[in-house]
Image (spheres, helix red, strand yellow):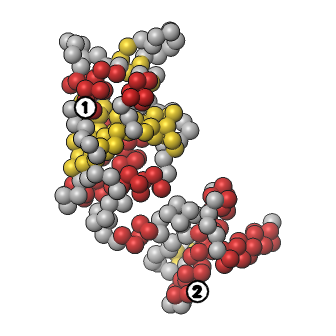
Amino acid sequence: MKVHIITIFPEYFQGIVNTGVIKIAQNKGLLDLKILNLRDFTDDPYRQVDDYPYGGGPGMIMKPEPIFRAVNSIKEKDSKVILLSPQGKVFNQKMAFELSKLPHLIFICGRYKGVDGRVSEYLCDMEISIGDYILSGGEAACAVILEAVIRLIEGVVGDYESIETDSFVSGLLDATYYTRPQDFMGYKVPEVLLSGNHELIRKWRRKSSLLNTLKNRPDLLKTANLTEEDKELLKEIEKELKNKE
């Protein structure tokens, strides 16, 4: 996969691109990542990338010319141009999987009050947000999306099966996991996980997944593809929670 990031703060990504799965993907030749300084595509001595908004109002708006020049200098037939914006579709795991299958991603990191509307209307294929809150710019959002996408490229993560059981992949939150020691400060690992009975462990983990989802993201249960076993487990969970009240 090829990735280009267009930003006015290239230094923001110095640590990110040399850490974790992003570094691994580059070392394995699975990721070709380049960062472009938007100011290199300006045509004035001040390297200005923003201007006042037409119609008045507070804040500054990113100019279209440098962004168009930057994108057009690297865009190919199969490129996907993405603007990081609070007006975009909210990023999720399904979107991460879809993006991980594409050959070339171009991320535009917005700043200031916003980006000239002609960028989203005539240059970008999509706008992505990472949540209902405002950041100082698109760099942090880009880093989040990049981390989520790159780890899904086959060959990047050593144990690909662990990705297939991540939270949100099945539409639910993941189960709770434990490791050694078995007894820590009197807090013990559930006995079923020590039993060696794979079917009981599978069922316990599914129930744990449903419990975590019910407690922390009940909205996901409305759209999850629940089996009859899941529905029975949910009844058990609700009964157990009620008995604890």
Residue 196 against residue 8 in the figure, above or below:
below
**From the viewer's perspective, is 167 left or right of 161?**
right
Say which residue appears at 35% left-offset and 55% top-offset: 100
Say which residue appears at 24% left-offset and 48% top-offset: 2
Task: Find numbered disc 2 in the image and state the secondary structure of the residue it sits on.
Answer: helix
Give the mark nearest the N terminus, 2 or 1. 1
Amino acid type assigned to the residue bearing label 1 in the image: Asn
**x then y, percent, for residue 120:** 42, 30
Labelled disc at residue 200: 2
Is residue 26 visible to the viewer in this orientation of the structure? Answer: yes
Residue 35 against residue 151 in the figure, above or below:
above
**x then y, percent, for residue 245:** 80, 66
Amino acid type assigned to the residue bearing label 2 in the image: Leu
Foreground: 56 or 207?
A: 56
Say which residue appears at 33% left-offset and 52% top-offset: 102
Q: CA distance from mark 2 to mark 1?
A: 56 Å
Task: Find numbered disc 1 in the image and state the secondary structure of the residue it sits on.
Answer: helix
Write down the residue under mark 1: 72
**x then y, percent, for residue 165:** 47, 69
Foreground: 143 or 149?
A: 149
